[in-house]
Image: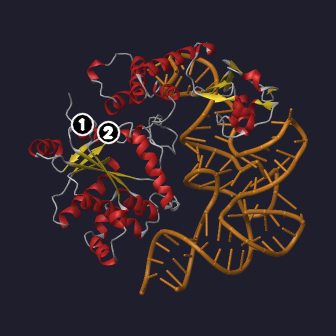
RNA sequence: GGGUCGGUGCCCGAGUGGUUAAUGGGGGCGGACUGUAAAUCCGCUGGCUUACGUCUACGCUGGUUCAAAUCCAGCCCGGCCCA
């Protein structure tokens, strides 16, 4: 069994995983394990679960997970990256996003015990200018510019705003406020976690240990998993689409996914990459739903490939009643595709049809003008776009 | 604050008065092939429109013109240099 300090861990600093082992073995109280959360995006995907899994492992050992909702930083608006300043969130939006976050994180974390949650506005909003100046005085411009994003943007003559320098400090101050023993974060957070150590030191606290988890590479096999890249698997996704996506993760990613997203022993994996993909999909869907539904998803996937669209069950569905309220009948197939969300626009839907990417009841449709007079004609029909998206049209409830 | 260069579609980047929804590349999507992968090849890549068209788009606002992403004015924003 790989220890908590090793599996799914890129780096522990300072001192490496031995330092964490030592801390775990020599402390006879629950450690305070910090995880900062950005409340701007409520949709969690598997990439987020990597670090959440790690946090859960600490919980299971009896330590305290301290979840910090970064509502204050979100209210300020973080212009990180080349894009323009992000829209500032209202307190209501933050509260809503945080709630959504909790609901989703519940699938991974233990919310019944060993958990604390905080909003960082509780302490950050109270800082006055002299305290902020103290924070700023702990770092130099040169140190700030050592940070990856800043250095690159500065080098590439991209704008770097002064208030961006405040973010690492605010995030670091969170560690002081909650007296973190260990902070978790993705590898891209290294700088920020290190600032937390510095500030704790300045405030006379014992600096936290920092544990970095790998960034999960998305389904495209190149970029990190993110919603905006569309290369993600959402944790609230229908189990069928979850299965369909995971069943074909790029070969190069399979072993990493097993390591970071399951607890399966790598030595027990099947030889064939194809079988590995299936096992991966099965086990992850099993975690978020249940093993029976995972099996069902696998069965459906197989039936679909073989064209047995009538043998499917428990597929993502779309009610024809609802469809009628969105598009008047007689309706063009393209309009139906848009209404069901299978295509982003009717123009796009037409292009997909002409490109041969749309199937109804397992048969390719190539006539973009095809229309249906009555919704009843579509009851029980499987509508597919490409290989990844499909819906079963059902009579209304 | 002064000087200078610049702001084009998801990204990069052409275009400097008119067949320009706007060359090209990347990315993305779809198809063929395959292991529902990778690689390769092909197609598509602003919205609406049951296809006749139409609306919106080149930082913002106004102007010149039959006609502007392209010319003019003001404004906003950014890089660099100087202070």
- Judge left or right: residue A354 versus residue A206: right
**Do circles 2 and 1 both sit on a common chain?**
yes
Question: In which quadrant is the N terminus of chain A drawn?
Answer: top left
- Distance of label 2 from label 1 (alpha carbons): 8 Å
Image quadrant assignment for residue A161 = bottom left
- 10 Å crowding of disc 1: few (<14), some (14-19), many (20+): some
Residue at mark 2: chain: A
Q: Earlier in the sequence, mark 2 or mark 1?
A: 1
- Given residues A195 and B79, the one toward you in this image is A195
Residue at left offset 43%, top offset 24%: A281
| Kind of element beneath mark 1 | helix
Figure disc tally: 2
Q: Which residue is mark 1?
A: A60
Label 2 with label 1: CB-CB less than 8 Å: yes
Q: In the picture shown, does residue A343 fall above or below A77?
A: above
| Vertical order, B13 against A28 (above or below) | below
Report the chain holding disc 1. A
Coordinates of residue A159 in the picture (x, y in percent): 46, 66
Question: Residue A323 appears at what percent x and percent y?
Answer: 71, 33
The disc label shown at residue A234, or none: none
Instruction: Residue A110: give its label.
Output: 2
> Could you tell me which residue is drawn at 80 percent across and 25 percent down?
A374
Q: Is residue A145 visible?
A: no
Taking A126 as reference, is A249 above or below it?
Answer: above
């Amino acid at each position: 069994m790989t220890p908590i300090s090793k599996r799914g861990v890129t780096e522990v600093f300072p001192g490496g995983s031995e330092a964490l082992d030592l801390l775990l073995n020599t402390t006879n109280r629950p450690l305070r394990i910090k995880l900062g959360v950005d409340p701007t995006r409520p949709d969690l995907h598997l990439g987020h679960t990597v670090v959440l899994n790690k946090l859960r492992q600490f919980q299971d050992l009896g330590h305290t997970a301290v979840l910090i909702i970064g509502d204050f930083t979100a209210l300020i608006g973080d212009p990180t990256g080349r894009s323009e300043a992000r829209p500032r969130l209202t307190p209501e939006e933050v509260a809503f996003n945080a709630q959504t976050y909790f609901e989703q994180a519940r699938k991974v974390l233990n919310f019944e015990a060993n958990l604390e949650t905080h909003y960082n506005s509780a302490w950050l909003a109270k800082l006055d200018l002299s305290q902020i100046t103290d924070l700023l005085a702990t770092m130099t411009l040169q140190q700030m510019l050592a940070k990856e994003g800043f250095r690159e943007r500065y080098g590439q003559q991209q704008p770097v705003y002064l208030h961006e320098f405040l973010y690492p400090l605010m995030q670091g101050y969170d560690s002081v406020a909650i007296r973190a023993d260990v902070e978790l974060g993705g590898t891209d957070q290294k700088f920020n976690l290190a600032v937390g150590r510095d500030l704790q030191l300045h405030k006379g606290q014992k600096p936290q240990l920092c544990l970095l988890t790998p960034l999960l590479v998305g389904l495209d096999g190149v970029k990190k998993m993110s919603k905006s890249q569309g290369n993600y698997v959402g944790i609230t996704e229908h189990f069928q689409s979850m299965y369909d996506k995971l069943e074909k993760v790029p070969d190069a990613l399979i072993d990493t996914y097993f390591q970071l997203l399951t607890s399966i022993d790598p030595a027990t994996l099947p030889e064939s990459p194809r079988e590995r993909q299936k096992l991966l999909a099965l086990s992850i869907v099993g975690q978020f739903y249940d093993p029976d539904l995972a099996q069902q998803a696998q069965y459906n996937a197989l039936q679909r490939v073989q064209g047995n669209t009538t043998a499917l069950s428990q597929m993502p569905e779309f009610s024809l009643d609802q469809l009628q309220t969105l598009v008047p009948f007689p309706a063009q197939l393209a309009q139906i595709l848009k209404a069901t969300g299978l295509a982003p626009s009717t123009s796009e839907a037409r292009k997909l049809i002409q490109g041969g990417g749309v199937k109804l009841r397992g048969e390719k449709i190539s006539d973009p003008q095809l229309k249906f007079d009555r919704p009843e004609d579509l009851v029980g029909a499987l509508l597919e776009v490409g290989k990844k998206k499909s819906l079963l049209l059902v009579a209304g409830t």
